[in-house]
Amino acid sequence: MKLSLEEMQAFTAVVDTGSISAAALQLGQTASGVSRALGRLEQKLEVTLLRRTTRRLALTEEGEVFLAQARRILLSVEEAEEQLALRRQTPAGRLRINAAPPFLLHVVVPLLGGFRARYPQIELELHSSDQIIDLLEQRADLAIRIGPLRDSTLHARPLGRSRLRVLASPDYLRRHGEPTTVEALGRHSLLGFTRPDSLNRWPLRHGVEQDFPVTPALSASSGETLRQLALAGEGVVCLADFMTREDRLAGRLVEILAEQTVETSQSIHAVYYRNTALAARITCFLDYLAEGLDVSLR
């Protein structure tokens, strides 16, 4: 019995995508080809790996055991390929990156042209999520996280910090006037996050307090949505510099209550599992990203 990498790739792709047709699309093969590879694998192992119903595929107990082994084998092959690429000084392979939509849009995307020109053999996959994801479950090589880190199982590389400012559009200020005190914000339309509540505590001096809790008139789960609302003149917002730098330079958003603002910044980290060797492609990306952040966060 000799198992092939093609058969293991077909099996893991079916598990990851949830169907044979989706796996075929991911692998660039026909559905019949993937189905035959899966059939050969089960025949060689003499077990059923997947239970097929008319609606979905489900792993058997044997399938769960073999899946973990197959992933390790495929990862070892991928790492071997990377080591050979390293010897040629040409990092290669697929790099799966997860980050919040505003960070992808305002920081990562502008840097991609230069990165791809420098490392043409690295294949990038960009995934956006406003929520903290499980790297293994989402099959991400690394994630960019903004704010305090809570997961001690992850290795983190600090990339920089981004200052928070209270902002509004010139149009909004013309129509409603500019608040000159923190208390005056109560008479304005405030834009805030649906969660967590900590994001709705703005870094403003208020009496003896160093932050000011706000009750949003309009809430959103995404910082990018709040930015667009602020640009549309819908209210006052508190956002990080990395997503508003260009707006401030162009005058589309202006800082307010600057004297009452406590200088506060959010940490930016790249995270990945400690028990995973940091591949050359990840190192290249993080080095390039750190260079770009040094400029965009000024």
Image (cartoon, rainbow, N blue to C red):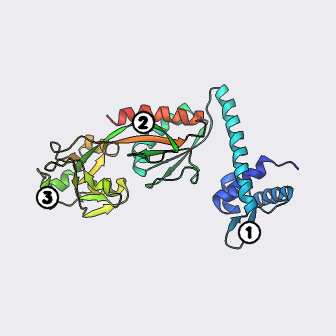
Q: Which residue: 20% across, 61% down?
A: 189
What residue sits right under mark 1 in the picture?
A: 52
Q: Amino acid at mark 1?
A: Arg
Q: Are marks 1 and 3 in contact (CB under 8 Å)?
A: no
Q: CA distance from mark 1 to mark 3?
A: 61 Å
**Element under disc 2:** strand
Label 3: which residue? 176
Q: Position of residue 292 (x, y in %)?
A: 42, 34
Give the farthest residue toward the right. Answer: 1
Task: Say if residue 164 shows up in the picture.
Answer: yes
Left or right of 88 on screen, residue 160: left
Q: Which residue is mark 2?
A: 159
Marks 2/1: CA distance?
A: 45 Å
| Residue at (73% x, 44% y) in the render | 73
Tag 3: amino acid: His
Q: Which of the two residues, 29 or 149, is positioned nearer the viewer here?
A: 149
Is residue 28 visible to the viewer in this orientation of the structure? no
Disc 2 or 1, which lies upstream in sequence? 1
Q: Nearer the viewer, mark 3 or mark 2?
A: 2
**Which of the image's four quarters has the C terminus?**
top left
